[in-house]
Structures are given as structure tokens and as C-alpha cells.
Amino acid sequence: MQLKNTIDTNMFPQSIGLEEIVNARELGGYVGADGRKVKRGVLLRTGALSEISEADRRRLLEQYHLTDIIDFRTSFECEAAPDPEMDGVVCHPIRILDEQGDQTAGMAASASGDGFPLEKLVEAIRSEKIRIADMYVDIVMNPVSMRGYRQFFDCLLEHKEGAVLWHCSAGKDRTGLGAAFLLAVLGAERQTIMEDYRLTNVYFQDILNKMETKLEGLGLTEEEMADMRAVAGGVNPAYLEKALDVIEERYGSLEGYLEKEIGITEEKRFRLREMYLEA
């Protein structure tokens, strides 16, 4: 199922006003450590950039002064829809999904962006080839994903000026976890992290409504419909909550996980807050 922008993004919270790129928003304005807000126009999160318009390209370069793109997609996704080249912008391909291991998380995370027909998604969910409820736990506990998010933070620490943008296909799962981890490092409350995560459902509401209309008559249970929404364009906050709960059970806290598995030391946390929070 291909996702297309069908909304006036300027009317949506945190929007960066792109016309052709789905789920395009920023972290600027959220409250972090010591009441300091995240800097505006610096930390951008989006869906795939392969169909970017010239107007969107100009906005990213001229308004946001974009210098770095972090691409969380699989090698297959990148080959099928490569990121555009932009003057002065460095692209950092970082793999979050384990392409050689269990493919269930990969199917779920990339399905919304790679043209999966709705009927095949229903079949995959019913046969448990896609286990949405466990997808986030699978990702955060996978060494490949841990290494990828460690590289993500390395890029953020090395970033010098202008905006940095990270994305996957729909800008909701791999991108959403990256945003959640970053907001946590910047000192945001869990409520703020979940608020940002839930915005995907606001941005994709038209798409989700159309999908549900198409699925009428297939006899989906309420749980199956929730899974379909989470795969085909939306998010289910319960899935991220579950992953965060598992992290807290195993590591004592999200901060403990980020330090042990993602390499966020106290010194790195301080540097990131100095870089990305207002004075």
C-alpha cells in the first residue's frame, strides 16, 4: 500500500510544510531537560523522500538549510526508491532492521511504504507472518537495530549546522523509535514522547479512513483492524508502550538501555542537549 500526502500539512502540529513527503514534521518546541525546548527547524523526521517535489527540495535547502539525511530503510527499499541527491547534503544509510534474520519485524515496518496490497497485509496478519504487537520489542532488542541507533546518535553528535533529517518509508516505526530515543535523551517526559508518536495517526487520518472503507466486509476483528491500521499507515501507542515497558523491565530504565546498548554516556547526553536544546 503506497502512502501519499493528502493533507494541508501546514495545518498540522509540528509540520515542516512539505507537499509530497508524508509524515513530515519536526521535534522543535517540545520541552526537554530543565524546561528547555528543542530547537526549531533542526531535527526533522519524515517518510520516504524518493518522490520529493522541487518545492519541497527548495524548502529543505533554503528554509531549513538541510545538511544531513539519515536513511533507516532496508537495502531493498533504498534500491527500489533511492533518496534524491541534493547539493551540499550528505546521506547516511543506516540499517535498523535485521535483513538476514527474522523477517517479521521487517515486513511490518516496511509494508506501508513498499506497495503491499491490503489483501496481502490482512493475510499476513491473520497468519501471524506479521506480528505487529511484538514488532517494536523485536526491533529494540535486536543487535542490528541497536547498532543502527548507535550510528544514528553518532551522526547527531557529529552534525555541525543546519538541519538533520531522518526517515524510513512511512516515517512512523523506525523513524518513530529514533525520535522517541532522541526525545528521551534530550530529557522529554514519556508523555511528550508518546504525544509525538501519536501524531502519525493525525497525519495519516485520511489514508486510514479510506483503508477502513476498503476493508469493510472482510470480517476483520477489532484486534485485526487495529493491526491493519498500525501496518498500513497508522500507529498503535500500545506497541511502543510495550517496548518501553520491556526496556524498563530488563534495563531498569530507558536511560539505562540507551547507555548500555546505544552508547549514550552522560557526556554524550550533555553534548546532545547543548546542541539541540535552546539555551
Image (tube, helix red, strand yellow):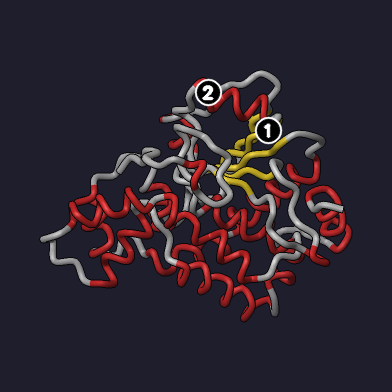
- The amino acid on which the numbered mark 2 sits, given as a three-letter code, is Ala
Nearer to me, 232 or 207: 207
| Residues at marks 2 and 1, CA–CA distance in whole angstroms | 13 Å
Nearer to me, 226 or 75: 226
The image quarter containing residue 135 is: bottom left
Query: Which residue, given by chain and number where applicable, does mark 2 sit on?
Result: 55
Relative horizontal placement of residue 63, taking residue 116 as reference (left or right): right
Question: How far across and how far down the image is residue 164, in percent?
Answer: 69, 38
Relative horizontal placement of residue 162, taking residue 243 as reference (left or right): right
Q: Residue at x 60, y 28 (%)?
A: 59
Q: Is residue 73 visible from the viewing direction of this image?
A: no
Relative horizontal placement of residue 224, taking residue 236 as reference (left or right): left
Question: How many residues crowd around disc 1 within 10 Å: few (fewer than 14), some, or many (20 or more)?
Answer: some
Query: Which residue, given by chain and number where applicable, does mark 1 sit on?
Result: 64
User: Is 2 situated above or below 50?
Assistant: below
For label 1, the SS is loop
Quadrant of the image containing the N terminus: top left
- The amino acid on which the numbered mark 1 sits, given as a three-letter code, is Tyr
Question: How far across and how far down the image is residue 126, in percent?
Answer: 23, 64
Question: How many residues crowd around disc 2 within 10 Å: few (fewer than 14), some, or many (20 or more)?
Answer: few
Q: Residue at x 53, y 28 (%)?
A: 83
Quick one: which residue is furthest to the left in this view?
217
Relative horizontal placement of residue 136, taking residue 258 as reference (left or right): left
Q: Is residue 278 visible from the viewing direction of this image?
A: yes
User: Is 117 situated above or below 139?
Assistant: above
Q: Residue at x 43, y 60 (%)?
A: 235
Q: Residue at x 63, y 71 (%)?
A: 190
Question: How far across and how far down the image is residue 82, in percent?
Answer: 49, 28
Question: How far across and how far down the image is residue 184, in percent?
Answer: 70, 64
Q: Earlier in the sequence, mark 2 or mark 1?
A: 2
Quick one: which residue is furthest to the front in this view?
11
For label 2, the SS is helix
